[in-house]
Image (spheres, helix red, strand yellow):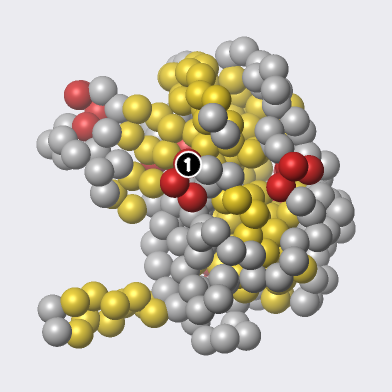
Amino acid sequence: MSGRLGCRLLLVFFVLLATTEIINAACVDTPQLAHSTVSIMRHFDDAERGENRELIGIRGTGWFLSPTTIVTAEHVVAGMKLSAEDWKLLEIVDGDDSQFIAARIKGLAGEHAEKLAVIELQRGVAAARSVAIRREPLVPEEQIMTLAYPAGRPHLVTGRFVRLGDDGKLAGMALLEVYEGDNRFVIDHGASGAPVVDCAGRVAAVVSNVFTQSLTWADRTIRISTGWGMPNVVSVPVQTLDNFSPAD
């Protein structure tokens, strides 16, 4: 299994990625999820970049728990160097709209290897639309969707819930299979924080990681996903928010 989904290119991406086709007919339309999911980015100053001058920031994805709170994966806020004490500017992008709002960590939730992070905004987002949370666990073979932001544009990608992880770092994690056509990396570098939604439009989990191996061939590194019918995406069950405890 790979490390975190963010990769350091011209900037480090923790974004939702997808192509432009849907593997199956989505049972929830994109307009139903409008203004619920946003791209978030923390721009670094010179001191934070250090010797890595090409690292201009961390981009991630989050979804609104309320107009002043956004949920994402724990390692996204860690990469952004957010804290519970200091307010730091985040760029929040919703479709064609972009705004800068100061933010800090309100708290972490969960007991899995990856937790969920709740980001507190210094002021509310007027257009924010909260999404209902699914209280019951997903059922094997149940269809799910994740709202993606390829090239900065929202797009819905479908998949299925396979099973819960039962060992080590995967224990209790929701394992998914998501692909478009032959592309099993449609959820890939930068997808951390994407909401996993059921057919009733309720958030059931949050994307955390992908399964992948690397093969070196003729001076090229080739990434290999899991086999067909196997899970290729790791996500955190959203029910972990039931135990959410705000930071002091």
Residues 47 and 198: in front is 198
The answer to whether 115 is drawn above or below residue 160 in the figure is above
Q: Which image quadrant is residue 159 in?
A: bottom right
The answer to whether 10 is drawn above or below residue 122 in the figure is below
User: Residue 223, percent across and down?
Assistant: 34, 75
Q: Residue at x 20, y 24 (%)?
A: 46
Residue 195 can be seen in this image = yes
Residue 114 can be seen in this image = no
Q: Residue at x 54, y 30 (%)?
A: 96
In the figure, is residue 73 to the left or right of 6? right
Crowd tier of the residue under label 1, counting other residues whose Cα lies within 10 Å: few below 14, some 14–19, many 20 or above: some
Quadrant placement of the N terminus: bottom left
Q: How many numbered marks does the figure carry? A: 1
Quadrant placement of the C terminus: top right
The answer to whether 5 is drawn above or below residue 46 in the figure is below
Instruction: Indicate the amino acid at tag 1.
Output: Gly
Residues 159 and 46: in front is 159
Label 1 sits on a secondary structure element that is: helix
User: Residue 44, percent across and down?
Assistant: 30, 27
In the figure, is residue 29 to the left or right of 180? right
Q: Residue at x 76, y 51 (%)?
A: 29
Q: Which image quadrant is residue 228 in?
A: bottom right
Q: Which residue is mark 1?
A: 152
Q: Residue furthest top?
A: 123
The answer to whether 55 is drawn above or below residue 84 in the figure is below
Q: Residue at x 76, y 33 (%)?
A: 130
User: Residue 35, percent across and down?
Assistant: 68, 33
